[in-house]
Amino acid sequence: MNQPFVISDAVADALQNGRPVVALESTIISHGLPRPRNLAAAQEFEEILRSAGVTPATIAVLDGVPRIGLDADGVRRIADEDMVKASVRDLPILAAKKISGATTVAATAYLAGRAGVRVFATGGLGGVHRGASSSFDESADLSALALAGVTVVAAGVKSVLDIAGTLERLETLSVPVVGYRTTNFPSFWLTESGEQIDWSVDSPEEVAAVMRAQYELGHGQGIIVANPLPPELQWEPAEHDAVLLEALAEADARGIRGKAVTPFLLSYIVGASGGRSLEVNLDIARNNVRLAGEIAKAWSRTTQGQR
Ligand code: PSU
Ligand code: MN
């Protein structure tokens, strides 16, 4: 029997020695950011972590094999190849067919958890789509985070989604949601969505304390750390609102459905905003990667990385 997934030497070594590791997602690279900026972004996210003394674990499926930690060629492949978008349910199919796939938040969190990587940085989460009460379109990110045992740092969810509905579902799924120094849930490009959450945390150490307590209480969930951009870096709200409405109308008019919805909206918005949304998107991801690095360091200080 072959290994079901492969942990890179760098990641395995860091985990064994209790050093900080942060998982990074690949769908954001292959389907969330346009070429050629996506390759530079994938490399930059890894470099932000390395220069902070944290080992990056970019996760993707290459030729059927889930990989936790990529080498330089693997990073290039997720940026350059036309890979399928892979959620948790796709993993066994890709494995049997030996096909490559870029992992969503759901699949990345699942694989990170299996490998023992406890902290994960992304841009925005998938969530409940508008109109979900008739379409049933709710991202598997939510149910996966309920089981992964991984803390994910994200700038909330985009307002193309039903934000209040997403928070309700996270409550049902018993996923803790904490704001980083805020109780106003961010809506990705905007610092505040207007939706309030119950709890905020003030430091990476406090996140690590919540992680430890969750583990000791015997819960297998993940934790969502909602990390807003500082207001001076957010997308101008009026332009944001106009472009979003246009994107939603266009998706509707073209009959875009299912797993194609999120990538369609993301690329439409980049085009319609003349690239502005992309710059803000990159700032969001950098901001989340930096915080995730600090959380991973706090986690490894308090626990030597063990749980
Ligand atoms: N939201 C973003 N950027 C992204 C995604 C979501 O702001 O890149 C990607 C992530 O990979 C996420 C996936 O896991 O889309 C969710 O897709 P779906 O809604 O089909 O579950
Ligand atoms: Mn969906």
Image (tube, rainbow, N blue to C red):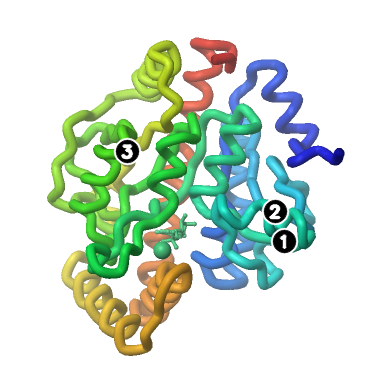
Q: Residue at x 53, y 41 (%)?
A: 109
**First reached walking from the N terminus: tag 1 or tag 2:** 2
Where residue 116 appears, as percent x and y from the top left, is 61, 27
Name the mark nearer the viewer: 3 or 1: 3
**First reached walking from the N terminus: tag 3 or tag 1:** 1
Front-most of residues 257 and 188: 257
Q: Looking at the figure, which quarter contains the C terminus? A: top right
Q: Residue at x 75, y 63 (%)?
A: 99
Q: Is mark 1 within 8 Å of ligand 1?
A: no
Q: Which mark is residue 127?
A: none
Taking 14 as reference, is 272 left or right?
A: left
Q: Is residue 276 above or below residue 101?
A: below
Q: Residues within 10 Å of mark 3 (few under 14, many from 20)?
A: some
Which secondary structure lies at badge 3? loop
Q: Is residue 282 above or below residue 81?
A: above
Q: Which residue is mark 1?
A: 100
Q: CA distance from mark 1 to mark 2?
A: 5 Å
